[in-house]
Image (cartoon, grey):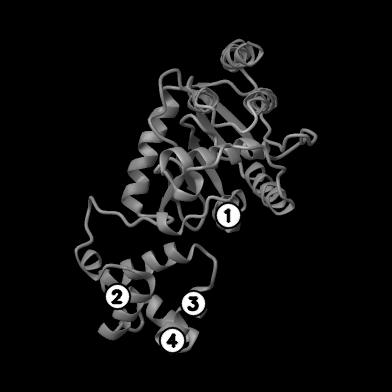
Amino acid sequence: MSAIQVELFKIIKLKLMGKEALGIALSDILHMSPDAVYRRYRGETILTIDEVQRLCKHFDISIDNLIQHNTGKAVFNYNPLDSYDFRLESYLEGILNSLRHLKSLSEPHFIMSVSNNHIFQLINFPQLARFRLFFWAKTHLLVPEYQNLKYFHKKTSEKAFALGEEILQLYTSIPSIEIFDPELMRGFLRQILYYYKAHLFQDPSDALFLCDRMLLLSKHLNIQAETGKKFIYGKEIPTEGNKFQMYLNETINSDSTIYYSSKENNGIFLTHNIMNYLHTVDEKYVSDSKQIIDKQLANSSLISEVNEKERNNYFYEFEKTILSFRKKIEADIEF
C-alpha cells in the first residue's frame, strides 16, 4: 500500500475521532460497500485518483500536503473560529465529545500539564467556566454581540449541568498524572479584577461570588491531591479507582498539553487561541511531545498523597492570593 494511502486513512480516522465506523462513514462518499472500503484501508485495493480526490474534498484534506508529508509536518484537528459558539452548553459539548472518544479507547490514561486554567476541574463550578467564556468572547475576541453586554450572574441550565456532570464522570474515571505550577488560576483572578475595575459586572458583588467559587475550587483540588482520587465536587470520595497523581513544577508550565495513551493509539491535545484546542495523533509529533512532558515530570515533585508540607504550602499560597484579590474588591465595594 502506498504511503499516501496510509497517511490519508490516518488523517480520516483522526477527523472521525471514533464518532462513526470507517466503513460506514466512507461507503456513502465512495459509493461502495463497507467491505470494499476496508479492502482499501487494509491495502488490498489501491485507491484511485478519483477516490482520493473525493475523500480529500469531503474531509477538507490538502492533497499537496498529503503528497509532501514528511518530518516537521503534522496534521491537527481544531474548531474553526467562525463556527465557534460561546454558549456554555456548546463549549461543554465540544469537551464532552473529546472525552467520550478517549474513554472509548482500551485502557486510556493521560498526562496533563496545567497552564493557569484547569479545563476539567473548572467545570465543577460552572459559573467559573461561564465567566471564562464570556471574557474570551467580549474582551479577547471582541465578538460584536457581546460588546454592549456586562457580565451577569445566570443560573446554569439543566442541559449545561447534565453535560458538565458527564464530562466530570468521564474525566474522573480516567487515570491521570497532572503537572501544576505556581500560576494556577492567577490569570483568571486578574480577569475578575479587571472586569470589576472596568465596571463590566452588572452587579459588582458577582466578582466576590466568583472569588468565593475559586476558594471552593482550591479546597476541592486540595482534597483530591491529599487522597490521590479525582471526584466530582459535592460527591463522596471514591474508595477505589479514579487515580489522580498531582505534581508540582516550581517554575512555569509554558502551555497546557494533554498526552493520552491507549492500546489503540496515542495522541496530543494542545490549548490553542486561549480556549480552543488542537488534536493530533501524528506519531512523530506525539513522540516528541511525550519526551518534553517526561522531562517536565522529572523536574517536578509529586505532592498527591505524599509531601504534605509542600502540598499544604501550595494551596495556602493559592488561597492567600484569592483572598488578596477578594479583599481589594470587597474594600472598594464598601467604600
Residue type, mark 1 in image: Ser
Q: Compared with residue 223, is residue 140 higher up or lower down, i.e. above or below?
A: below
Q: For the residue carrying disc 3, how many other residues have a C-alpha within 10 Å: few (<14), some (14-19), or many (20+)?
A: some
CA gap, disc 1 and disc 4: 36 Å
Where in the figure is residue 94, as x and y percent of width and height?
54, 54
141, 214: nearer the viewer:
141
Q: Nearer the viewer, mark 3 or mark 1?
A: 1
CA gap, disc 3 and disc 4: 12 Å
Which residue corresponds to mark 3? 25
Which residue is painted at 33% across and 42% down in the image? 288
Give the mark nearer the N terminus: 2 vs 1: 2
Provide the secondary structure element on which disc 1 rests. helix
Residue type, mark 2 in image: Met
Residue type, mark 3 in image: Ala
Where in the figure is residue 161, as x and y percent of width and height?
71, 48
Which residue corresponds to mark 1? 90
Which residue corresponds to mark 4? 36
Circles 3 and 1 in contact, beta carbons < 8 Å: no
Identify the mark at residue 1; answer none if there is no mark. Answer: 2
Provide the secondary structure element on which disc 2 rests. loop
221, 39: nearer the viewer:
221
